[in-house]
Amino acid sequence: MDDRVAITTLLLAWNGGDQAALHRLIPLVHDELRRLAHRYMRGERCGHPLQTTALVNEAYVRLVDSSRVRWQSRAHFFAVSAQLMRRILVDVARTRRKHKRGGGGVHVSFDEALAVAGGPGLDVIALDDALRSLAAFDERKSKVVELRYFGGLSVDETAEALGVSSVTVMRDWSVAKVWLLRELERA
């Protein structure tokens, strides 16, 4: 069975209360969760209190505790995972900033292509604020950025997760990149 199908099947079984499905699911998703966490951590400053493994573990704990989520597919699982990792990093950054008593964040431009995660020094709080503003303006475009940029999903996987066409995802992606770049430059 294809891993994509196996993951979706196990997620649906886990939804149905099959705890053994969760134990079979973890080895199938672990490498992808580490890849997501590594992508996030690549954009963090040296000396960050979390490492890739700690970020995966924290996301795993939150995912297992999220019994309210009704998993739909592999793409949905990784979209939620990416969102959780971003929230964890934003929480850590806000806590660190609070302890620094408002220490200034580093201004970072949002490269128009959004092809790779931000380099060291990415102001994750400014990016999170910009994404929240985008969500208030257009939630679907915000979700497209989250799934493509942070989740590493393809256009087709993003379209599947959001229930829209691939053309719509590409259009939203193009508009969202420009919108976020403008917001980050303003910050």
Image (tube, helix red, strand yellow):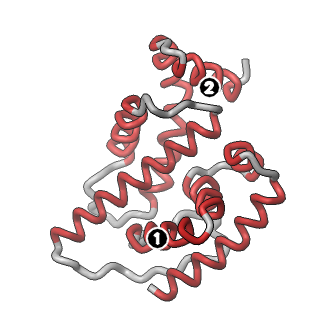
**Quadrant (top left, top right, bottom left, bottom right) of the N terminus:** top right
Residue in the picture at 44% in, 85% down:
187
Where does residue 157 sit, x and y in percent of width and height? Answer: 72, 45
Q: Measured along the vertical axis of the image, is residue 50 above or below residue 100?
A: above
- Report which residue position mark 1 lands on: 127
What amino acid type is highlighted by mark number 2? Ile
Cα distance, mark 1 to mark 2?
31 Å
Query: Alpha-carbon neighbours of circle 2 within 10 Å: few (<14), some, or many (≥20)?
Result: many
In primary-sequence order, the first of circles 1 and 2 is: 2
- Say which of 65 and 45 sits in front: 65
Where does residue 3 sit, x and y in percent of width and height? Answer: 67, 25
Q: Quadrant of residue 44?
A: bottom left
Residue in the picture at 77% in, 47% down:
156
Disc 2, SS: helix
Q: On the rendered structure, is 17 left or right of 53? A: right
Where does residue 20 sit, x and y in percent of width and height? Answer: 47, 11
What amino acid type is highlighted by mark number 1? Leu
Q: Measured along the vertical axis of the image, is residue 105 above or below residue 58?
A: below
Q: Measured along the vertical axis of the image, is residue 13 above or below residue 80?
A: above
- Report which residue position mark 2 lands on: 7
Residue in the picture at 62% in, 78% down:
179
Q: On the rendered structure, is 17 left or right of 2? A: left
